Amino acid sequence: MEHLFMFIFALGGGFFGAAIGGNYVFALTGFSILAAIGAAAGGAGDFSANLFNYVCFGPFLGPHVAFGGAVAAAAYAAKRGYLDAGKDIVKPLAGLGKNDVLFVGALFGGLGYLIKTGVAEIPWFGTHTDAVATTVIVSAILSRLCFGDHKLLNLDKGKALSTSEGVHWLEYHEKPTQLVTMGLLGGLFAAGVSVYLGVTVPGIGIMANTLPFAFSAITILILSLGGTTPVTHHVTNIAGLGALVFYPVVAGVDDLAAANAAGIDWGAATWAVLIGAVFGIIAAFLGELFARLFQIRGNTHIDPPAFAIFTGNTLVWVAFALVG
């Protein structure tokens, strides 16, 4: 009965995402993470866990539900001629006045819950990846197959990895030097915040990387309103995770709980932040690679940061296994 309850709950989450627009509901996910982190820091561990599991990354505001529902609804609306572009994940779709669009959003919200639940049960992979981000990609692929041009890889005439006038993801950070800068400096920012909070604040632990991720998610509001802000949530998520996972290795302790009891080792923290920055650079390039392969010439949205997060997350754990 719990799964039935959550599925029904997720129908509402998918509707909500479609109604207010994918980017806007993703920003709300960022705000909800701030509340969950605050609750953890304040000692309300159970309340924080419930916020993370059922609101931030669950059937209400979880990107696999709310954002995924908005992506599918936009693709469907374009197919029906209600919307100019199937990749429009900014426009609140309630304004179209079409109930069928909102029902599609609800359906994909429920589907997102089911897919994420299944991904989490895959042996090894389910616990060594980001099941939410994986589901965002699977759901978006299904959206394109159902409502788009059915083309996944952009292999048209060998142009898969090239950009041109009007064919970009974000042209102000697509060059290798721009990606290195964003990945390195954004990674240092995220890794520094994550390590300091994860080691010094009891109760946050491995979830500390969600704080810089939340900051990045909230900045999507600026992008949606016409600002040329970078898209960084894949960088901040993976850089922060990499730093947190490798801090105990370089500090010579068993885990973050032991690190918390021992107090912060500034030398180890510095090395962990640098390791996190390396993963930030990798995440930046993964996002741009995915955009060029799947997004920029497609007619529905398949999210480049989600791809970078689920592949980057797994790369962090594989690297940890190799050295741990």
Image (cartoon, helix red, strand yellow):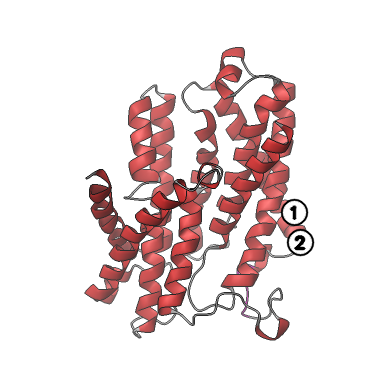
Is residue 54 shown above or below 230?
A: above
User: Where is the C terminus found, in terms of image quarters?
Assistant: top right
Q: Is 266 positioned to the left or the right of 198 in the image?
A: right
For label 1, the SS is helix
Q: Which residue is drawn at 36% across and 55% down?
A: 114
Viewer-nearest residue: 22 or 107: 107
Is residue 262 shown above or below 314?
A: above
The reply to whether dot 1 and dot 2 touch (C-beta < 8 Å) is: yes
Q: Which mark is residue 176?
A: 2
Is residue 280 shown above or below 51?
A: below
Asked if residue 232 shows in the view, the reply is no
Q: Which residue is drawn at 30% across and 55% down?
A: 13
Mark 1 neighbour density, 10 Å: few (under 14) some (14–19) many (20 or more): many
Viewer-nearest residue: 7 or 220: 7
Q: Is 129 positioned to the left or the right of 64 in the image?
A: right
For label 2, the SS is helix
Q: Residue at x 72, y 47 (%)?
A: 184
- Name the magenta segment's main secondary structure: loop
